[in-house]
Image: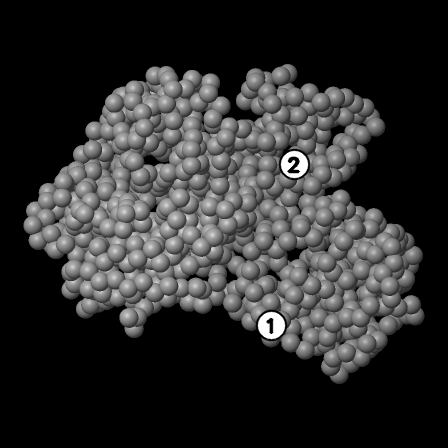
């Protein structure tokens, strides 16, 4: 009859189920096994990593066996009756887990219909059952599903809880299940069960544990005390896991094992340890292999979790070749596995008594777990040739799997069986190793074993140059640089630079740089917002908006040669980590990776006719257009492009184009200031400010409360905000997105006069005039304008080289029909509020407004976006402006023109404020369905007219000093 304690997870509670009864010998309580104690502590501290820990297995059933559902469920019931471990749960007793074995009960079995051999349906069911955490106190420690085809069982899916069985025990259980399906019974008794093992461990086995603990303490003293210092903020989750599936690794490992008469597992461990130590530069390091603890005869068929972590020290002094390395690893791991049977609380207590922090003691070292089913045995070494083995590498595949929040090591490797080969999973802590190092590490591991299968490899066990300590493997070649031998071509280049001639006296020099660290980090909040903009600006005209071109004139008297300037550029990139940072999309997430070293291609252009361009300005302007035209490839390209303009063999202009995804306007100024110092003095006296990776770490770890306050401000101020461009004015003409430019010296002088007269900023003057131009004839009580904030108010941010700018929401109060002077005061207060709340996590911002029912991509489109991108906005109080008559006369020089249109644009109206020679350029980008073409020029001229009038007197509502503001 059905038991009342049947627990079915909600994820498949409504699926077709059979309730299989079982009853067997053995019941009662027992303490947890030593392995269960470790797993339970991990689950309690870090949560259930069930997708990794649930053991998924599938038993194919031949069609010839003609097994129906009734026969299969009987076999499952007999299996659970036979093994007391499968009838054991882990309820909490006195605050800790205890094993509770039941004499009888009911197991829910899922039945699913499949096609063919049922394998595809079995994979789906395995995910369904395995992707849900076990309720260890209430649920049986296995889940079973039957896949039927034509009313016959073709696949049996079993998912085990790793708290009760390990991989070896799972195979013992599946072997019994196969025999029960085919024969109906088993004549031999079952092996020891989990409660029996626990009682033995808490009794007679404690002396063995004491010997193991003493070994761990003794060996640990051999390790150098070199703490693991983070190289960067890392990602979230910080531990990222890549998987290499390779038949070449499997074949090579078996060939090496046969050649040196060691186990395949030892070969895998040696190869892994070789690459890991080659990266870290450590001669003596710890290796932590997982032991199945089946050495004792009575535990050969035990159905329990006996797996525990072993520990050994591998000493690579004397630069051993790979054969000697393998011998040392084999000897050390065998010793470590012999001492991997211990009571975990006793081991922890012993370390803590010695003053060793058990939580961090093993972080700098390497964990290795070979969970293949035929460890140490299997088929003999295959016959193959070096060429065939190397050809097999072309079929290896790499992919990412789910990351982890925490582990006891910064580097972990797992080896599993895969069809036709093995799967090697490398887990790397991105706070210590960049995510970019994971795939190169695995590829080097594969390459090492393939080479060692047929050749004796001397230290450092590679026919290629090893990566330098602390750098990512495979990071020595940089896409986008000019190939070269490393020798210098000509006499005007810097040592170590590679040169490729282009044409017409131009050359590209590959300038080396060498920074401190290779590291990973999430994108900064500003970068995330900018990346979204890059997706929206999918047009050549849009690419220009997302690059920051800057030109640095070099005085002739400085006598700067090309070699000196190239050295300065290399030193600049070395100094600023942000300039050697690229974007990566790994594990379905975008993040940034800083390279420790590399090369930057720099174009050197010699002016052919100095008398026509004596200071190189014309050449610099042409180079700027060339460098900014292509869209940045943020995956392969460095985030800046550089060119030198030489006149009579001296550098007169340096052209730099930055990616706006890596630096903002303020940061570009900081970088140019440093470049100027490096060009003229050869050094920068002050340390560099925070870089992009530093900012990303601060935002993730310390700025969340600020973000929450900012998002709450947005929600509060957006409520009831009147849109300026809510309704279309007609059908959208072609082209739809038009751009109009007004270059005005009058605006340049007027905003300074307005700011000085009203003790405010020039930006606030433009903000108030924009609001007036948008709302004077609307009768609305408020006006919403989206502004760009540089977010430099935080301590240290004024020196940061990164992208910090984000949009803020400015809500201007228009009640009472204020005059322009009052409007200006209100604009100042509203702008200050907007800037104070423009530093936030874009993901949190998007979630919040989505939850409120808004489309976060489009809900701000009806509001004007104002971006004051001028570099010099301050008012010089000692410099008088023109008088009223002269300022009005200057308006006659104002020029309007149309700029190239955009193919698409997210805003209905954007006003950019840009620097121009002795003037200000106002650029409107208009969605002409809402902001018609015929309104663009009058709007800009109306803003100009209002500012000119307000420079000398207050302008009453509706702020129209002259006709034609509309």
In this view of the protein, which residue sits in the foreground, 292 or 963?
Answer: 292
Look at the numbered disc 2 and give the secondary structure of its residue: strand
Residue at horizontal 55 percent and vertical 41 percent from the top: 581
Return the residue found at the far bottom.
Answer: 816
In this view of the protein, which residue sits in the foreground, 414 or 146?
Answer: 146
Image quarter (top left, top right, bottom left or bottom right) of the N terminus: bottom left
**Residue under pointer 2:** 641
The quarter of the picture where residue 463 lies is top left
Q: In the image, 845: left or right of 119? A: right
Relative image position of residue 509 (x, y in whole percent): 63, 25
Relative image position of residue 449 (x, y in whole percent): 38, 25
Residue at horizontal 33 percent and vertical 31 percent from the top: 268
**Residue under pointer 1:** 852
In this view of the protein, which residue sits in the foreground, 220 or 818?
Answer: 220
Image quarter (top left, top right, bottom left or bottom right) of the C terminus: bottom right
Task: Tell me if residue 274 comes above or below residue 924 in the rendering.
Answer: above
Residue at horizontal 68 percent and vertical 72 percent from the top: 811
């Amino acid at each position: 009859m059905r038991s009342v304690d049947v627990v079915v997870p909600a994820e498949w509670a409504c699926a077709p189920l059979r309730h299989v009864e079982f009853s067997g010998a053995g019941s009662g309580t027992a303490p947890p096994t030593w392995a269960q104690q470790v797993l339970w502590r991990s689950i309690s501290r870090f949560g259930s990593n069930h997708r990794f820990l649930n053991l998924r297995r599938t038993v194919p059933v031949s069609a010839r066996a003609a097994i129906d559902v009734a026969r299969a469920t009987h076999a499952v019931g007999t299996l659970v009756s036979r093994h007391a471990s499968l009838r054991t749960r882990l309820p909490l007793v006195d605050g800790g887990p205890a094993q509770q074995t039941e004499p009888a009960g009911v197991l829910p079995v899922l039945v699913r219909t499949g096609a063919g051999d049922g394998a595809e349906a079995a994979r789906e069911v395995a995910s369904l059952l395995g992707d849900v955490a076990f309720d260890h106190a209430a649920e049986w420690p296995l889940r079973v599903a039957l896949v039927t085809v034509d009313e016959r069982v073709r696949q049996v899916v079993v998912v085990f809880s790793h708290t009760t069985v390990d991989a070896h025990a799972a195979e013992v259980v599946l072997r019994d299940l196969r025999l029960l399906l085919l024969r109906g019974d088993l004549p031999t008794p079952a092996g020891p069960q989990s409660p029996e093992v626990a009682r033995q461990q808490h009794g007679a086995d404690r002396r063995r544990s004491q010997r193991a603990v003493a070994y761990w303490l003794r060996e640990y003293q051999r390790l150098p005390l070199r703490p693991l210092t983070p190289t960067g903020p890392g990602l979230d989750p910080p531990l990222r896991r890549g998987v290499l599936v390779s038949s070449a690794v499997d074949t090579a490992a078996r060939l090496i094992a046969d050649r040196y008469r060691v186990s395949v597992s030892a070969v895998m461990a040696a190869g892994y340890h070789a690459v890991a130590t080659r990266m870290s530069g450590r001669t003596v390091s710890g290796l932590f292999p997982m032991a199945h603890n089946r050495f004792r005869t009575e535990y050969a068929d035990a159905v329990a979790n006996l797996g525990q972590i072993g520990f050994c020290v591998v000493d690579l002094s004397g630069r051993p070749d790979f054969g000697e390395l393998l011998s040392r690893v084999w000897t050390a791991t065998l010793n470590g596995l012999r001492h991997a049977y211990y009571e975990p609380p006793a081991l922890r207590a012993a370390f803590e008594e010695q003053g060793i922090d058990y939580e961090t003691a093993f972080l700098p070292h390497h964990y290795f777990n070979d969970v293949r089913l035929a460890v140490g045995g299997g088929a003999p070494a295959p016959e193959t040739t070096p060429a065939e083995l190397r050809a097999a590498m072309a079929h290896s595949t790499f992919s990412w799997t789910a990351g982890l929040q925490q582990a006891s090591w910064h580097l972990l490797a797992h080896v599993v069986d895969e069809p036709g080969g093995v799967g090697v999973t490398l887990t790397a802590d991105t706070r210590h190793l960049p995510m970019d190092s994971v795939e190169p590490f695995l590829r080097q591991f594969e390459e090492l074993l393939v080479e060692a299968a047929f050749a004796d490899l001397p230290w450092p066990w590679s026919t290629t140059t090893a990566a330098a300590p602390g750098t990512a493997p495979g990071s020595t070649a940089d896409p986008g640089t000019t190939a070269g031998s490393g020798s210098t071509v000509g006499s005007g280049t810097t040592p170590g630079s590679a040169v490729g001639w282009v044409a017409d006296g131009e050359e590209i020099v590959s300038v080396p740089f060498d920074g401190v660290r290779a590291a990973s980090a999430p994108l900064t909040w500003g970068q995330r917002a900018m990346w979204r903009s890059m997706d929206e600006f999918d047009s050549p005209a849009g690419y220009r908006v997302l690059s920051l071109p800057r030109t640095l004139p070099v005085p002739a008297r400085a006598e700067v040669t090309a070699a000196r300037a190239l050295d300065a550029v290399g030193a600049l990139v070395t100094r600023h980590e942000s300039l050697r940072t690229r974007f990566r999309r790994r594990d379905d997430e975008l993040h940034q990776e800083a390279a420790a070293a590399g090369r930057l291609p720099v174009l050197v252009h010699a002016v052919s006719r100095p008398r026509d361009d004596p200071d190189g300005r014309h050449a610099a302007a042409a180079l700027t257009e060339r460098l900014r035209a292509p869209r940045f490839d943020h995956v392969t390209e460095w985030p800046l492009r550089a060119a030198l303009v030489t006149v009579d063999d001296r550098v007169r202009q340096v052209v730099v184009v930055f990616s706006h995804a890596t630096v903002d306007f303020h940061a570009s100024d900081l970088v140019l200031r440093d470049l100027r110092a490096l060009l003229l003095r050869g050094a920068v006296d002050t340390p560099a400010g925070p870089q992009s990776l530093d900012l990303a770490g601060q935002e993730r770890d310390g700025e969340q409360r600020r973000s929450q306050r900012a998002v709450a401000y947005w929600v509060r101020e957006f409520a009831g905000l009147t849109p300026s461009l809510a309704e279309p004015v007609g059908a959208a003409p072609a082209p739809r997105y038009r751009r109009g430019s007004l270059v005005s010296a009058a605006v340049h002088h007027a905003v300074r006069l307005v700011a000085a007269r009203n003790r405010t900023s020039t930006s606030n003057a433009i903000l108030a005039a924009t609001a007036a131009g948008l709302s004077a004839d609307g009768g609305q009580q408020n006006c919403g304008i989206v502004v760009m904030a540089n977010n430099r108010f935080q301590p240290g941010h004024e020196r940061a080289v990164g992208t910090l700018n984000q949009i803020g929401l400015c809500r201007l109060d228009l009640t009472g029909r204020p005059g322009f002077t009052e409007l200006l005061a209100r604009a100042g207060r509203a702008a200050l509020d907007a800037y104070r709340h423009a530093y936030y996590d874009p993901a949190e911002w998007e979630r919040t407004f989505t939850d409120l029912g808004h489309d976060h991509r489009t809900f701000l489109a009806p509001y004007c976006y104002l971006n004051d991108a001028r570099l010099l906005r301050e008012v010089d109080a000692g410099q008088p402006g023109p008088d009223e008559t002269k300022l009005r006369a200057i308006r006659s020089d104002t020029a309007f023109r149309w700029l190239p249109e955009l193919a698409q644009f997210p805003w209905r109206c954007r006003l950019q404020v840009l620097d121009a020679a002795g003037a200000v350029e106002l650029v409107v980008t208009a969605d002409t369905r809402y902001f018609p073409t015929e309104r663009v020029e009058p709007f800009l001229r109306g803003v100009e007219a209002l500012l000119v009038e307000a420079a000398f007197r207050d302008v009453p509502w509706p702020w129209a000093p002259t006709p034609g503001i509309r």
